[in-house]
Image (spheres, helix red, strand yellow):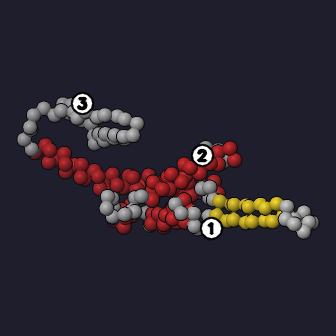
Amino acid sequence: MPKSAEYVFARRSLWESAVISYGRVGQGDKRRKIDLDALFEACGDPEVSALHDEIQNWRHGHVGHRNGREFESVEVLLGRDALPVPTALRIVIGTAVGPVQHDDLMERFAAHALLLRNTIWEKFMLPLAVKLVGDAQRREPIGDDVALPVEFTPDRFVATLDLWRRPSHPHK
């Protein structure tokens, strides 16, 4: 998306949405019990934790709460036009709109998200998938596998993950 005034709010909303979504990764301990230290160590990138902290600083300091001084400034100017009585009040808000002001951050964030995604799959999900498939192959068949009906609605997201495809798989 071009770095121009015409797209500033669209760019900002996409950036902020990405930062908020990313920030949910390690927040809370009820639904997503993710051990970030283990994930970062599995990545093998010594900078992954520092970039995580930088993105979280954006989230906590600006995107989520608008309280980081480095992200926003406010100036109030009183115009008098050489008159004893004020004639105008100008409020100037300078706000960081995202990577447009920090060119390399977007690229580093995209690479960071890709690294975390790949690490989660390769180091955590794939071994679990292999185990589950092995367990399923050892069990007695209950009957013909039946595809569960999937209802798509505008407020529901359904994802199917094909672990791998084999030419000899009977349900190809």
Residue with the mark numbered 1: 70
Amino acid type at image mark 2: Ala
Left or right: 13 in relation to 115: right
| Quadrant of the image containing the C terminus | top left
* C-alpha distance separating marks 3 and 2: 42 Å
Q: Nearer the viewer, residue 170 or 58?
A: 58
The answer to which quarter of the image holds residue 168 is top left
Q: Secondary structure at mark 1?
A: loop
Identify which amino acid the numbered label 3 is placed on: Lys
Location of residue 100 (image quadrant): bottom right
Write the residue at 45% across / 54% down: 21
According to the picture, the residue beneath numbered tag 2 turns out to be: 10
Q: Secondary structure at mark 3?
A: loop
Residue 44 in view:
no
Residue 172: which numbered mark, if any? 3
Q: Residue at x 59, y 51 (%)?
A: 12
Q: Secondary structure at mark 2?
A: helix
Q: CA distance from mark 2 to mark 1?
A: 22 Å
Is residue 40 shown above or below 158? below
- Which residue is situated farthest in the left direction here? 140
Circle 3 or circle 2, nearest the eye: 2
Q: Amino acid at mark 1?
A: Glu
- Spatial CA span between label 1 and label 3: 55 Å
Residue at 7% from the left image edge and 41% from the top image edge: 140
